[in-house]
């Protein structure tokens, strides 16, 4: 499942995939794969993304029915 919430949060803050990746210590490809739904990040990585984007786990990673 695509993570459009994460992509939108990143774009709202005008942060590129590359910049976000550098800030949390992963590759740009990892960020792209998370956003496209091709990679299931660890809880540690989810928390790092949330902290960097100023969002909660629920706001970025909770799947709504």
Image (cartoon, rainbow, N blue to C red):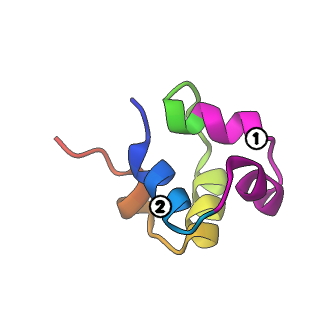
Q: Is residue 2 left or right of residue 11?
A: left
Give the main secondary structure, helix, strand or loop, of the magenta stretch.
Answer: helix
Disc on the earlier residue, 1 or 2: 2
Q: Please, is residue 32 above or below residue 42 in the view?
A: above
Most extreme residue toward the front, as rendered? 14
Residue carrying label 1: 28
| Quadrant (top left, top right, bottom left, bottom right) of the N terminus | top left
**Residues packed near mark 1 inside 10 Å, few (<14), some (14 to 19) or many (20 plus):** some
Residue 61 lies, in percent from the top left, at 42, 51
Residue 28 lies, in percent from the top left, at 76, 41
Most extreme residue toward the top, as rendered? 38
Q: Is residue 31 left or right of residue 8?
A: right
Q: Secondary structure at mark 2?
A: helix
**Residues packed near mark 2 inside 10 Å, few (<14), some (14 to 19) or many (20 plus):** some
Determine which quarter of the picture holds residue 24: bottom right
Q: Residue at x 40, y 51 (%)?
A: 5
- Residue 48 versus residue 2: which sits nearer the camera? 2
Residue 32 lies, in percent from the top left, at 63, 36
Report the magenta residues as a range. 15-33
Marks 1/2: CA–CA distance? 16 Å
Q: Please, is residue 62 above or below residue 23 in the view?
A: above
Residue carrying label 2: 9
């Amino acid at each position: 499942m695509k993570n459009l919430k994460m992509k939108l949060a990143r774009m709202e803050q005008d942060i590129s995939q590359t910049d976000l990746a550098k800030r949390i210590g992963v590759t740009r490809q990892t960020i792209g794969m998370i956003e496209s739904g091709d990679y299931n990040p660890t809880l540690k990585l989810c928390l790092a993304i949330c902290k960097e984007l100023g969002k909660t786990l629920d706001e970025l990673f909770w799947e709504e029915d």
